[in-house]
Image: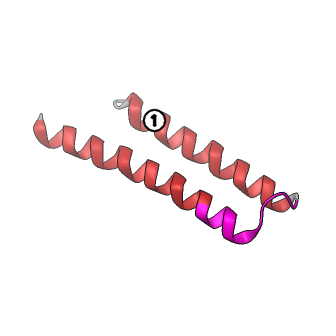
Amino acid sequence: GENPELDEAVEAFLRDTRSVYEEYEEGYMDPDAALWTIEGHLDSLEGALRERNGNDERN
């Protein structure tokens, strides 16, 4: 894509969120921990998006 950093962030979010879901389904993670972990992944993805938008505005 046009923004490899954002592409990487999306791929990491999908991979990491799927991993949390699988751990939860297998009983390795409780619901609160799963949601807290996914929130961290969302924060990372939002940060990458904000960074991209900031870079777009500067160009």
- Image coordinates of residue 11 in percent, x first then y, are 55, 39
In the rendered image, the residue lying farthest to the left is 58
Colour scheme employed for the rendering of this structure: secondary structure
Residue at (71, 54) in percent of width and height: 20
Looking at the image, which is closer to me, 25 or 27? 27
- Provide the secondary structure element on which disc 1 rests: helix
Q: Main secondary structure of the magenta part?
A: helix
Residue 34 lies in magenta, yes or no?
Answer: yes
Magenta segment boundaries in residue numbering: 27-36
In the rendered image, the residue lying farthest to the bottom is 32
For disc 1, the marked residue is 7
Residue 5 lies in magenta, yes or no?
Answer: no
Residue at (36, 49) in percent of width and height: 47
Within the image, what quadrant is residue 36 found in? bottom right
Within the image, what quadrant is residue 56 found in? top left
Label 1, residues with CA under 10 Å away: few <14, some 14-19, many ≥20: some
- Image coordinates of residue 38 in percent, x first then y, are 59, 58
Three-letter code, disc 1 = Asp
| In this picture, residue 45 sits left or right of residue 34 | left
Total number of numbered labels? 1
Within the image, what quadrant is residue 23 found in? bottom right
Looking at the image, which is closer to me, 39 or 17? 39
Q: Quarter holding the C terminus?
A: top left
| In this picture, residue 27 sits left or right of residue 40 | right
In the rendered image, the residue lying farthest to the right is 26
Residue at (56, 40) in percent of width and height: 12
Looking at the image, which is closer to me, 52 or 44? 44
Q: Quarter holding the N terminus?
A: top left
